[in-house]
Every structure is written in C-alpha cells, then in structure tokens.
Image (cartoon, grey):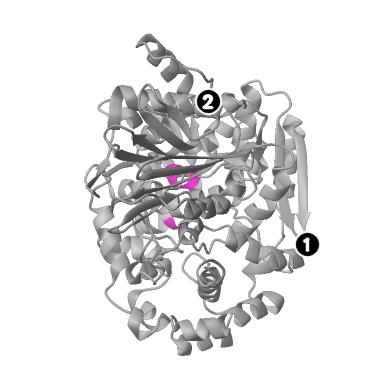
Amino acid sequence: MCGICGELRLDGGVPDLGALTRMMEKLRRRGPDHGGTYSDGALAFGHRRLAIIDLSVRSNQPMVDAELGLALVFNGTLYNYPALRRELLQKGYHFYSDGDTEVILKAYAEWGEACVEHMQGMFAFAVWEMQRKRLFLARDRLGIKPLYYTFTANRFLFASNVQALLAAGGVDSAIDTVALHHQFTLHAVVPAPRTILKGVRKLPPANTFTVDREGRHHLRRYWALEARRPPVAHSAEEWVAMVGEALQKAVQSHLSIADVPVGVLLSGGLDSSLLVALLVRAGVEDLRTFSIGFEDQPEEKGSEFEFSDQVVARYHTQHHKFVIPNDEVLTRLPEAVDAMAEPMVGQDAVAFYLLAERVSREVKVVQSGQGADEVFGGYFWYPQMERAAGSDLERFRSHYFDRDHDEYLHTVAAPYRGDDHTANLVASLLAEPGADTFMDRVLRMDTTTLIVDDPVKRVDNMTMAWGLEARVPFLDHHLVELAFQMPPDLKLQDDGKFPLKRLARGILPEGVIDRPKGYFPMPALKYVRGPAYNFMRDVLETRACRERGLYDRVYVNKLLAEPEQHFTRIKGSKLWHLALLELWLQRNVDCV
C-alpha cells in the first residue's frame, strides 16, 4: 500500500522535478517507509512506500526492469500474485524480488493492457514503456484504490490524492458545477471521472487509461458487473453455502498475502464480527481487534462496545478498545478534513481517522467490513425502494437523494445552478444493461459507483493517513460476482443481508446477528448543537465562505436558524454538508 504520482510532458519538455517532490510530500503519510523517484525524458515517477509484502529493498519503487524496458509505480495489493508469479516463471520470466510489485511488471510485458484481467486485488498503478514512450494506468474493478489525474495541453499529471496534484501547481481549482450537484444530492459522492474541481479527474473503477507523449489517449473498461440469475436455480441453503465458501476464500487470501500481522476493525456490527469469526476459523490464533467509541449523548450511546465485547469474549482476540472524548472530535476534525482526497460528509470519517491513528501503532494491515451492506442489501432504504412505485429513477430518488433539484437550486448561488445532473446520471446508470430487476440495478449501481466514493474512499483515506492498509474482503470481485447472481429478494430477507446472517448463526452471538443495523456513532457531530453547531456556523460565516459565493445566503441562514430541523432522507445534516465542503475548500484549495 503506497502513494504514487507522476508527470508526462506532452509539449516536448521535461518534467518539473520540483513539482514531483511537492507531490511526494503530500503522499508521505500514505507511504512512510521509503520514497523514490525515476525519470526518463518526458516522464517522471514518484513513489512513497508502505512496506507490507517483501519488506526488503528489492521491492522498493519506482521499480525498473531495463531488460523489459518498463518502469512501474504501484499502490495496492494483489492477492493472487503467488499464482501469477508461478505462471510467469513457467513462461520464462525471471524475478529478483519476492513481492507483488514485480509481478505487475512481468504481467504487463506478457499480456499488455489485458494484464489487469489476470489480477485479483486492489490496485492503482502506472507503467511506463521506455521504447514506445507510452504511459499506462489502471485501477481495480471496484475502485478500492484511488487514482486522480490532471490532463492539459502541456502535461499529464497523476497521483493518489487531489492534494498532491494541487501541490504540483497549475491545476484548475474552479468548482465543477456538475460535480457540485452530485456533492449535495448523493451524500458527497461525485462519481468518476469528475471531482469537485474542474481540473482534477479520476480514473473510473475497472478502467485502464493509455496516453503517449503527444497526448493521444484512450480509455478502456475491462470489467462489468452483471446482476443476472444463473442458468441453474439454487435453493436458499445452496446460496448460503456458496457465499460462505467464497467469503472464507476472500478472508483467507486477504490474510495470507502480508509479511506483517493483520488485524480487524471490529465495530460490533455483523460484518466486522463475521470477519473475526472467519479469521479464527482460518487458523489465526493471536488475532488483534480494534474498536472505538465516544462519549454518550442523552439520545444515543457513543459506542457499540456492548456488541464488540461479545465477539471478543467468544474468540479471545487481542482486543484494543479506544474511547475518544467528544471535545477531541472537533479539535481533530480539521486534520481529518486535510486527509480527505475529496470532501466527504460521512461523519464516521473522523472516527476512522482517530481509530486508524491508534491502530497504526499496533499493526500495519487491517481487515474491514466495508461493502457488505451494498453487496448483500443491508441498508434500510432498499426495502423502501423495492415497495415504491414509479420509474427506476423515481423509486431511487424518493428514498435516497439528499435534496430534490428544486431545493438544490435554493442551496447554491445563481452562478452554480443548472440542470438536474444527478437525476440524469442516476437514470443512465440504472438503465445500463445486464441486470434482471430493479433491485439488481440499484445494488449494482451502489456497489460499482456510489460505494466507491463514500465508504470505500473514506476508509482508504483515513487509514492511509496513518500508514495503515485497510483490506475489504466483502469486495473481493469473485465474491461480488457470485452475490450478484443471487436473487435480490433473498438478500433482503430478514431485514437485509440474509446470507450473512445465516452464515453467522452458531458462530456469532445472537445479539450481534439480530441487532438493528447500526452506524458508527458520532454524537459530537450528529447532534447539531453546542460546540458542533458553533463550529459549523463559524465556518459558514468566514470571510472566505462569503467571498467564494458558493451558497445562497438565504438558505444558509435558514439552516443556521433551525440546525436540527433539516436532515436528508438518510438522516444526514444539511448544515453539516455545507460546512464540510467549505472547510475542505479552505484547507485544501485556498491554501495552495
């Protein structure tokens, strides 16, 4: 797990090595163990390493194979690299390291663009072809690893986060009005290739991108998720058994590919608790688990320790429990915002940031339960959509959008108003072929698009801010492909995630399995009052916010006057949405 960056000049010039240094500095926390650079004429690479596999210097990057004429920077982990390595050895390739990085170089030499189709894991990487003077970039199927870029007439820049691109200089940081509509409608999800900034784009998941030094380029999608029933029908028991086998394989592969200890972020929910049970069944005897909690509010507990403690008691893990004072949440919030590659309104981002800080002192790799709710239908709004009438868009929008378009037009100032971009995008995504039913289409869109830029990105950014690698077995693409053959009504049984609940019977406490769906409790931010309200108000009343002119001040004043009256359909604070974006712009754009 690492941070990568690079520049390809398109005007006959040479890369700005000062800009490369500045980019690498913005990636240092993603890779604290080593930094390296490589240049070849119009191309320069930078890399920051978090050493997880083959801890020796032989796997430092950028990695160059002069015999093959290739150079590489890579962020991620290939869980099937031992098998690929054996296959490539049989084809005559020679290896001087023992990690997964060199496997990518040989795989590209053997299969070219199609190398990604042989890979299982999470990855974002760039390969430079020395002879053809061509740059190849790739991102994993489900977008677990990030890859941002800036493309102008003179140069092509790429990096693992937006901050690195901005540090390079010359990036158009004006607000993208289409992305702004998504920001305030889809819980701050801005689907690829857009970002909130006009000059920054991101490679979509399951895509490769090739560009040469004349600027000629092409994008290729190499994988698409289908949600169709298999030719042979299966019983519920058969589906549960197949899911159990695939999940056990995913957990095992995500465990074994590491030369350092692996822990689990144990929230106390079904998903992370099931990971603990399966890891112990896989033979892990000294499993380390980590939970975080906050001070209680009158309306809500600040932790889920009562559930995580039950799992720890059953499996005798080496458990670490962290309690964060509420006043520390607001104090540390700006740090978490600095670590966001894009503005994220999920309040548990701060919790993940504070948890990762403490976990990184104990281990370098953890497994996390992200993806299970989207793949197996765990959210409360899915049944609501299923029962609703109307078109696909109407059924989805009425239970998911943060704001309808009319309200959006009152949220932002006149220069930022426009068409209903989010409705147009969602309608097109739901209309893509390869899904049998409405709920198939919803779950597929959630898994391949919306999750990428919400919980998955959140976990990557907050853990990598502390040099901690987070692995997500529920997003193993083989498991996901299997799950999307399953009838969605089976997933939605038993209030959602029926296959996982059935698998958990007998290996987890019943109270953990049957508890209502929980969310990372963050009372200090969830209740918009006292210090939290003052914090948001102060951000929105700064001179920077007023001069930016992004928001309609009448709308802002309405939210400030009634801070606990304006929530989205899925319980998000509309005031927090505005304050978070403004704070992100102040800390990540205005200061450049």
Disc 1 element: loop
Could you tell me the amino acid type at mark 2? Ser
Front residue of 478/9: it is: 9
Q: Point out the stretch of residues depicted in magenta.
A: 371-381
**Residue 324 against residue 62 in the figure, above or below:** below
Q: Residue 464's spot in the image, x, y percent?
A: 59, 47
Does the magenta segment cover residue 258? Answer: no
Q: Which residue is mark 2?
A: 253
Disc 2 element: helix
Left or right for 379, reference 538? left
- Specify the quadrant that holds the N terminus: top right
Front residue of 495/182: it is: 182
* Residue 466 visible somewhere in the drawing: yes
Q: Residue 208's spot in the image, x, y percent?
A: 31, 41
Q: Which residue is mark 1?
A: 325
| Quarter-of-image position of residue 42 | top left
- Looking at the image, which residue is at 63% across and 25% down? 259
**Residue 534 against residue 16 in the figure, above or below:** below
Q: CA distance from mark 1 to mark 2?
A: 37 Å
Total number of numbered discs in the rendering: 2
- Of pointers 1 and 2, the one earlier in the residue sequence: 2
- Looking at the image, which residue is at 37% across and 46% down? 448
